[in-house]
Amino acid sequence: MEPEVKLLDENKRRLDGRAVDELRPIKIEAGVLNRADGSAYLEWGGNKVLAAVYGPREAHPRHRQDPARALVQCRYNMAAFSVSDRKRPGPDRRSVEISKVVSEALGHVVFKEQFPRTSVDVFIEVLQAEAGTRCAGLTAAAVAMADAGIPMRDLVVSCAAGKADGTLLLDLGKEEDNLGEADLPVAIVPRTGEIVLLQMDGHLTPEELEKSLKSAIDACHKIYEIQKDALRRRYAVTAEHEDTPPPPEAPKPEEVEAPEPVVPETQEGE
Ligand code: ADP
């Protein structure tokens, strides 16, 4: 059936003006929360996501502890105000599923054996949703984990590809996700090329699947650079703070003019 909304114009430009293989703009900032061990804020097109990480810390409840390794536990949540109709607060099937696949993807890169009986707790809060929030959340969470200093083999980075209006598209927007034919979120460990998340909603032919997978993986490598840049900026800021000279009201001792010594006037004949 022809969709009522034309998702591509005659020049194959998308509703938001992007080319078929173009990502939405992405911004990441690491270390945005003071109370968590690590954190990151990410904007990806209309998505706004906060990720906070604690741990490794003693796992609770105790019966869930693994004597051989750390648990990596993620909770993905969409704020009630993240979508245009108020979303019913609390976990639903979708958020339980996303929490599970994200936990597994992040668990692949953590050196879990080094921290038996502990848990790495990852919280993803979607403040504003516009399709692709699991990719956005996972990408932000990996930066927050690095910010928390969790020993990891590499970051995890995620991006979706898919199909709408009969055309393969990178990084589906909201209408493309809702009205399109397929959505293929992918996450990789960029250094090794391992795929740590692969889901598919809709239908693609084997050739389309292969092409979409390649396009999502290529995009992941670009997003990896943005993640690393966020972490570099975070540490540059920390280093800058360490080098900050004392404030002007506290001049260095050598700059302080020594006061004139007060020589008591000697009385003649003393
Ligand atoms: P993802 O966000 O990873 O693409 P989905 O494909 O399940 O996951 O969701 C696509 C988009 O649909 C979300 O990003 C969000 O914009 C919207 N959406 C999801 N759940 C709801 C909801 N309960 N109410 C309104 N919009 C929703």
Image: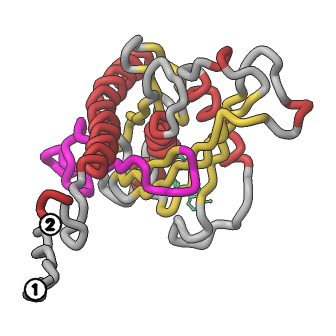
* Residue identifier under label 2: 256
Image coordinates for residue 94, horizontal then vertical, percent: 67, 47
Position of the C terminus by quadrant: bottom left
Q: Which residue lies furthest to the left in this view?
A: 268
Q: Which of marks 2 and 1 is in front?
A: 1
Image coordinates for residue 33, horizontal then vertical, percent: 49, 56
**12 in relation to 106, above or below:** below
Decide if ligand 1 comes within 8 Å of the CB at mark 2.
no
Image position of 203 (left or right of 96): left
In this rendered view, identify the residue nearer to me: 118 or 99. 118
Asked whether 13 falls inside the magenta stretch, the response is yes
Q: Residue furthest top?
A: 192
Decide if ligand 1 comes within 8 Å of the CB at mark 1.
no
Q: In what element is the residue under mark 1?
A: loop
Q: What stretch is highlighted in magenta?
A: 9-37
Image coordinates for residue 198, horizontal then vertical, percent: 53, 25
Which label belongs to residue 269? 1
Q: In what element is the residue under mark 2?
A: loop
Residue at the location (46% across, 28% down)? 156
Image coordinates for residue 89, horizontal then vertical, percent: 70, 65
**193 in relation to 66, above or below:** above
Residue at the location (57% across, 51% down)? 36
In this rendered view, identify the residue nearer to me: 262 or 124. 262
In this rendered view, identify the residue nearer to me: 241 or 183. 241
Q: Three-letter amino acid code at disc 1?
A: Gly
